[in-house]
Image (spheres, rainbow, N blue to C red):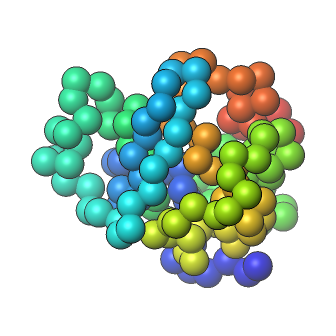
Amino acid sequence: MPTTPDTLCPSAQHDWDDARLFAVVGGAPDRPETAYLDQTQPVTPALLELAGPVAPAEVFRFAAPCAKSACGHYDDARSTCRLVEKTVRLAPVVFEKLPRCAIRTSCRWWQQEGASACRRCPQVVTVDYAPSPEMREAADPIVR
């Protein structure tokens, strides 16, 4: 699928320009789970305070315009995201039925890998204190 100028990274940080909350992380440290919102929410100081006492990235997933070349996971030569490529290749499927997602149509991962990315996305978290070897490898921007 072709990307668009407003293509969103589903693994953004809350302080990126135009970041939006699109999911909440729950589960256990060794088995994180993502619950998706029906609509994205703007990142505000009040929203970030809801994460306390932990960092916002521990409990929220944010989307923001894809940083492309400014991101260590982006492959300029192929205009692709290596993080989602490796996640699809290495991580197990979490859901057969795609979860509802407020950013899907704008999501780089969906545009690039389609349903294969969405079936694995719920286990992807920004802060993972007990990553599996597969998720550790997928998250490492140096490993190809």
Q: Is residue 79 left or right of residue 24?
A: right
In the depicted view, which residue is nearer to us: 28 or 102?
28
Residue at position x 78%, y 30% from top?
A: 134
Which quarter of the rendering shows the N terminus?
bottom right
Is residue 36 something that shows in the picture?
yes
Coordinates of residue 137 in the picture (x, y in percent): 77, 30
Is residue 80 something that shows in the picture?
no
Residue at position x 20%, y 39% from top?
A: 50
Based on the displayed image, in which of its 4 quarters is residue 68 positioned? bottom right
Residue at position x 50%, y 45% from top?
A: 34
Identity of the residue furthest to the left in this view: 46
Coordinates of residue 119 in the picture (x, y in percent): 70, 55
Coordinates of residue 144 in the picture (x, y in percent): 86, 39
Is 106 above or below relative to 144?
A: below
Coordinates of residue 80 in the picture (x, y in percent): 76, 61
- Number of numbered labels in the structure image: 0
In the depicted view, which residue is nearer to us: 26 or 83?
26
In the depicted view, which residue is nearer to us: 94 or 127?
94
Is 108 above or below relative to 92?
A: below
Q: In this view, does 19 lie to the left or right of 27?
A: left
Based on the displayed image, in which of its 4 quarters is residue 109 positioned? bottom right
Is 33 above or below relative to 95?
A: above
Q: In this view, does 67 lie to the left or right of 132?
A: left
Identity of the residue furthest to the front in this view: 97
Residue at position x 27%, y 62% from top?
A: 42
